[in-house]
Image (spheres, rainbow, N blue to C red):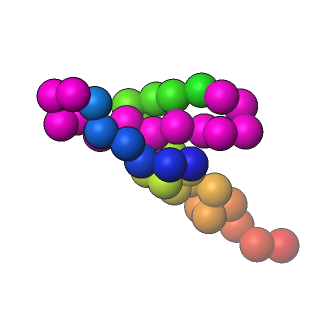
C-alpha cells in the first residue's frame, strides 16, 4: 500500500499488487484480525 494525495489534498491509498485505490486506510480496516482467540 502507498498513501497518496489528490489535487484537493485528500489522502487515498494505492494497492500496487491489485492495482486498486481506496479512500479508507487499509490499516484501519484490518484491525479485527487480532481479535481471534488463540487456541
Residue drawn at point x = 50 percent, y = 49 percent: 2
Residue 29 covered by magenta stretch: no
Q: Which residues are magenta?
A: 7-19
Res 5 → quadrant: top left
Res 8 → quadrant: top left
Q: Residue 37 in the image: state x and y as whole percent.
A: 70, 67
Q: Is residue 29 visible?
A: no
Q: Residue 24 in the image: state x and y as whole percent.
A: 40, 36
Res 18 → quadrant: top right
Residue drawn at point x = 46 percent, y = 29 percent: 22
Q: Is residue 15 left or right of residue 37?
A: left
Q: Looking at the image, is 36 positioned above or below residue 5?
A: below
Q: Residue 3 in the image: state x and y as whole percent.
A: 42, 47
Q: Looking at the image, is 5 positioned above or below residue 8?
A: below
Residue 10 covered by magenta stretch: yes
Q: Residue 12 in the image: state x and y as whole percent.
A: 37, 36
Majority secondary structure of the magenta segment?
Answer: loop
Q: Is residue 36 left or right of residue 12?
A: right
Amino acid at each position: 500500500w502507498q498513501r497518496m494525495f489528490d489535487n484537493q489534498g485528500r489522502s487515498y491509498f494505492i494497492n500496487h499488487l491489485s492495482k486498486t485505490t481506496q479512500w479508507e486506510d487499509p490499516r484501519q480496516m484490518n484491525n479485527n484480525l487480532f481479535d481471534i482467540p488463540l487456541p
